[in-house]
């Protein structure tokens, strides 16, 4: 930081302190405060959306990877008993289907997900530091304006014998006001425009998210439907009727009767 910048920082800190003690009037700009509040809410929403979208993409990959491991274990269970049984064939078919689904996620969904969802979110969030810098600059210029206004008022209230003091204070006031008004007007005009653009900006990403979810669900349904042919036709009806739960309980009861599973 230059010496000039350091002095400005010290002066602004002093102005802030004097405003807190009521010695310098603070400019209250409710229009800007309202626009900044809406912008801050949007900024927070975009940051959360980027974080959650990353979690979602990671979760999709983690889910199919976990399914692959489950399928490998199931294939091992059935294959160890009888590799030609219906169960072993179903376990093998399930493993193949899950491997295809997992490969499809990596091959067909990863790149489009990054391109249509993560990258637009990243670009939008990259704007916020730049906008925040403009807001910070505007706030600093407001402090300069408040300080120059207070100084001009003091010179007017207590005229100096130095004839150059009032014109100098007036010029400092006018310059500070001009710079502040320019930055303030720019932000008040452009912050609402930024928020108005959020829907058309995110529309393609939202549509892409829906299409990818549909594709994943459809492919998963198609592949799992192919595995169902290895099970008896009455399995689905038995499940709906709660009979499969009874079968599971029956098997568990047989396990509990084994000496190695029984209570000591």
Image: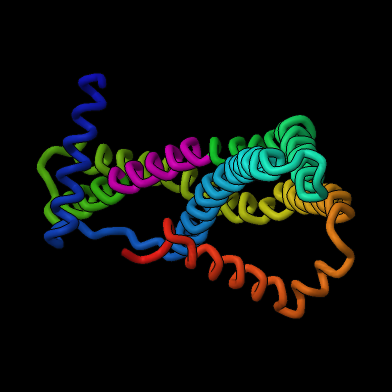
**Which of these two is toward me, 222 or 117?**
222
Quarter-wise, where is residue 263 in the image? bottom left
Name the one closer to the observer, 36 or 23: 36
Would you say 60 lies left or right of 230 here? left
Q: Residue at the spot x=88%, y=50% of the render? A: 226
**Residue sitting at x 34%, y 48%:** 142
Q: Is residue 241 left or right of residue 186?
A: right
Farthest residue in the top direction? 2
Confirm whether the magenta stretch covers residue 138: yes
Residue 174 makes an appearance in the image = no
Q: Which residue occupies 51% across, 47% down? A: 47
**Which range is magenta?**
128-144
Question: How is this picture coloured?
Answer: rainbow
Left or right of residue 1, residue 23 in this image: left
What is the number of callouts on the image?
0
Corner quadrant of residue 232: bottom right
Which percent across, then down, holds residue 218? 84, 52
- Looking at the rendering, in which quadrant would you find the C terminus? bottom left
For the N terminus, give its image quadrant. Answer: top left
Q: Main secondary structure of the magenta part?
A: helix
């Amino acid at each position: 930081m230059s010496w000039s910048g350091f002095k400005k920082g010290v002066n602004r800190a002093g102005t802030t302190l004097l405003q807190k003690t009521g010695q310098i009037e603070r400019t209250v700009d409710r229009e800007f405060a309202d626009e900044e509040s809406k912008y801050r809410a949007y900024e927070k929403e975009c940051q959360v959306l980027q974080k959650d979208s990353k979690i979602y993409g990671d979760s999709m990959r983690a889910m199919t990877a976990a399914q692959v491991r489950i399928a490998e274990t199931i294939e091992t269970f059935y294959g160890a008993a009888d590799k030609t049984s219906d169960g072993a064939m179903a376990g093998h078919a399930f493993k193949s289907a899950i491997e295809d689904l997992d490969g499809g996620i990596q091959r067909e969904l990863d790149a489009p997900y990054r391109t249509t969802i993560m990258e637009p979110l990243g670009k939008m969030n990259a704007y916020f530091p730049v906008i925040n810098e403009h807001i910070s600059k505007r706030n600093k210029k407001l402090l300069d304006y408040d300080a120059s206004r207070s100084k001009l008022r003091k010179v007017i209230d207590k005229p100096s014998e130095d004839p150059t003091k009032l014109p100098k204070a007036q010029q400092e006031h006018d310059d500070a006001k001009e710079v502040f008004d320019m930055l303030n007007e720019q932000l008040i005009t452009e912050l609402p425009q930024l928020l108005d653009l959020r829907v058309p900006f995110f529309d393609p990403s939202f549509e892409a998210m829906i299409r990818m979810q549909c594709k994943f669900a459809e492919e998963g349904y198609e592949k799992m439907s192919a595995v169902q042919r290895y099970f008896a036709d009455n399995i689905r009806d038995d499940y709906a009727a709660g009979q499969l739960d009874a079968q599971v309980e029956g098997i568990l009861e047989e396990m509990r009767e084994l000496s190695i599973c029984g209570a000591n």
